[in-house]
Amino acid sequence: MLKNYKLLLLTCLCLPPLTSLAQSKLINNINGYTVSNGKLVEFKALQFNGDVIEKIYLENEHLPYSTNTSIVRIDGQGKTLLPGLIDAHGHVLSYGLSLMRAQLRGSVTEQQAVETVVAFRQLQPTMQWIQGRGWNQVLWPQQNFPVAASLDKVFPDTPVWLVRIDGHAGWANSAAMKIAGISSATTSPEGGEIIKYADGQPTGVFIDNAMSLITTKIPQPSIDEQQEILLTALTSLAKQGLTSVHDAGIGSDTIAAYQALDYADKLPIRVYAMIDAQDPEFDKMMQAGPMASGSDKLHISSVKISADGALGSRGAALIEDYSDLAGHKGLLLYSKKDLGDTIQQAMDAGFQVNTHAIGDHANKIVLDHYQANIATSNSRHLRHRIEHAQVLQLADIPRFAQLNVIASMQATHATSDKNMALDRIGNARIKGAYAWRKLLNANTIIAAGSDFPIESPNPFYGLHASVTRQDHDNQPVDGWYRRESMNLTEALATFTTHAAFAAHQEQMIGQLVPKRKADFILIDKDIFAINPKDIWKTKVLETWVDGERVE
């Protein structure tokens, strides 16, 4: 028996590694681009074996002989090949659900939004609750918040809940408010606001923490249902050229759904998930520490905290009054002590802390907490992040690099918010808003995302906005505060190397060099050769993860 065991062991030791038994693949006839050490590298072919890159071939390098039968050749047909793009801030479950809900993005009046919901209801006649997302009153003629009465006319008995484009406000009809027990006597919770008429009756709009008064009454999908929703969302994201996504705030049930998909080897792209600090199981998860995964597809070692609301709904916490609403400074979703305690708890547990902060007050408070708590927890190496970092005091910009804090930002927020941001914060504060160039000049790492489903997850929209500071109609002509723009190499880095760095995955993904994962995409345009105004029109032809085509 022992003799046989020794023979088996000797045989195993003599066998070559499994990766060497696999056949190398070579994609040639391509315009290849990757960013390495901040510089753009161009190449003409990519060779990989299994899920690992073996070599990229520069223009002056010879390809393997065509007679080499150990290499499978793939003709790239002259297309452009990029590293798999990474979205550093999205909401996968919400995106999946949005694909199954009324789409109100682009509604130009309150009545048009209502008509969209009516049309959606005809397609989904059996749903107990009608849900939708994407309305934006800033695009409407009077820019007033919507009211329940306009929904009540067509949905007198069926509850309706419609989330604003930024996810920080919701619009309910009277049937929904009745189920939730909302009346003139209901008070706004801390960190939230129930918009009311002068007589005290609720209008139907709920801001930030007040949204939970309605959402807790809506039946939530089971873990099994969440798996299907997540899979639908991730498959859609892969089609758009994303090979990895940072899921910004998930609960314990969604974690279980992800783990089930990972265990079954069903995740089409990589997921770097942040634990929602509001989850009832948060304390237990902090005690357990970062979660090990069975594969390279799922990582759960960070926490998502929300410090304030959003600028469009005037929930972002500002130091001074809103320029277009005297006496109002926005909303802090935690007391200063509770926010500090939560940050400290997560840092002490070994988690990267990623805190949503949009207003200059929220950003300053978060940076203050980070400065104190990074020192006491000795966690500078965890590369804590501020999600959005949208409106900053100029004096706070250098603090990101000083504290080794990453700015996780979304370029399309600038081009979407340009219609209202100046009204909200005025000429002085706008100098520190959406300030990509100032942050880069201060040696800040910017990781790019989209904040889908608030914005489209299409990463080429983000690349376009990063470079042009324009919308898809090429407005404004010279770009919105164009001096804050990036060049295309910098923008590509924010969606690749920097986003990978923001997830502690720079040794695995983010660039196409030997020993990294074979995550890449083929696209229909050479984005470095076309007019930047057309970048957003780019189409993804193929998406590869771990050396396998997934879309």
Image (cartoon, rainbow, N blue to C red):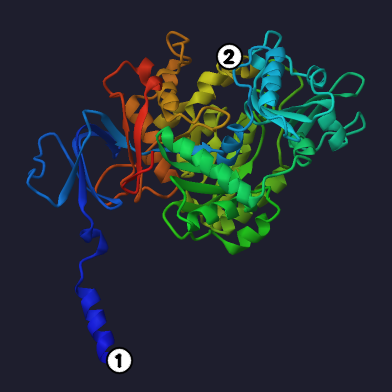
Q: Is 146 situated left or right of 108 in this image?
A: right
Residue 181 figure quarter = top right
Q: Quadrant of the N terminus?
A: bottom left
What secondary structure is marked by label 2? loop
Q: Earlier in the sequence, mark 2 or mark 1?
A: 1
Vertical side of 18 occupied by 448: above or below:
above
Amino acid type, callout 1 = Met
Vertical side of 330 occupied by 550: above or below:
below
Q: Mark 2 or mark 1: which is in front?
A: 1
**In the rendering, at what x and y percent does residue 74 appear?**
21, 39
Going 58% across and 42% down the picture, which residue do you hit? 229
| Residues at marks 2 and 1, CA–CA distance in whole angstroms | 78 Å
Which one is nearer the viewer's eye here, 466 or 406? 466
Q: Is 413 situated left or right of 308 in this image?
A: left
Report the residue marked by disc 2. Answer: 419
Q: Quadrant of the C terminus?
A: top left
**In the rendering, at what x and y percent does residue 237 appear?**
47, 36
Amino acid type, callout 2 = Asn
**In the rendering, at what x and y percent does residue 514 appear?**
24, 49
Q: Which label belongs to residue 80?
A: none
Going 25% across and 59% down the picture, which residue do you hit? 19
Report the residue marked by disc 1. Answer: 1
Could you classify mark 2 by the number of other residues whose Cα lies within 10 Å: few (under 14), some (14-19), or many (20 or more)? few
